Amino acid sequence: MTALITTMDISTWKMMLHQAEILVQSGMLPNSVKTPAAAVAIMMKGHELGMPPMQAFASINIIQGKPTLSPEGMLAQIWRTIPKAIIDFIRLEDDYCEIKAARPGRPATTFIYTKEDATKAGLIKKDNWLKYPRAMHRSRCVSEMARTLFPDAIAGCSYTPDEIDPDIIYMDESGEIAVQKKEPTSEKPQDRPAQPKEKPLEKYDEEKHWSGVLTLCGMQGDESYIDLLKASLEGILMDRSTVKELQAKAIQDDKIRRQREELLDEHPNLGE
């Protein structure tokens, strides 16, 4: 039996990190591998199983935090690590799979997976089972056989992806994952915290707007100043006489306002 690799030196680890970044950027990895961290996790498990990186990506998927192996990956591991293992497919159909397998020097054991088994497990109407019934029966039969007779060969990758998450959608019979459906949330609409209502926008008040501009400038909101400011900021075309007239009116109004304020300061009772 070929020994599995259980240790990793620092140079291998650094090379793996570098390879993961390049491979993710290449876009050549399976759809489920989207980040360098996910790529490293698969590469590490592949390293433990003695798989080169690209074979690991083709065979291993991390589903709900558990490493899984495709049925092809399980068979490859068994035959690679236990070359004298015997695995015979006695019958393989859309609704039935039968395998006879044995470890070297040990009696053979028969494994069967049928449509009735899939129906009892609530699988028969799942997307993958409707599209690839023969492949799915084979997958369940192979994983049961691998767990039972060859657990040392699969080293903890005891299930296929759809055994962990039956709602996974495969792209084809090879087992490459196309979609991993999210679990439905149990949160009810009434359980969600109420969102504060946005205040309605105030209706635009032109005079209030220009008065505010003048206030920011340290000036009173007299109409004469408003007219002059609007004329200058809005770029209204005026002849010189109009501009001079506005300027003179603003100066006169400001002079009158200042005189009124001085008079009120000297005689406060006049304001009552």
Image (cartoon, helix red, strand yellow):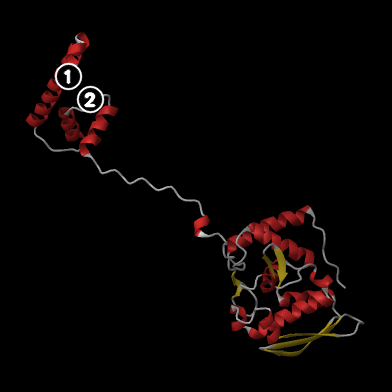
Residue 81 shows up from this direction: yes
Few, some or many residues within 10 Å of mark 2 (<14, 14–19, 20+): some
Q: Which residue is mark 2?
A: 220
**Left or right: 64 with respect to 215?**
right
Provide residue 149's location: percent of width, then percent of height.
84, 77
Above or below, 2 against 124 in this view is above
Q: Residue 148, located in which quarter of the rendered image?
A: bottom right
Provide residue 170's location: percent of width, then percent of height.
61, 75
For this rendering, which residue is in front, 264 or 10? 264
Type of residue at label 2? Gln
Few, some or many residues within 10 Å of mark 1 (<14, 14–19, 20+): some
User: Where does the C terminus fall, quadrant-wise?
Assistant: top left
**Left or right: 165 with respect to 272?**
right
Q: Residue 234, located in which quarter of the rendered image?
A: top left
Q: Residue lying furthest left in this view? A: 241
Residue at disc 1, secondary structure: helix
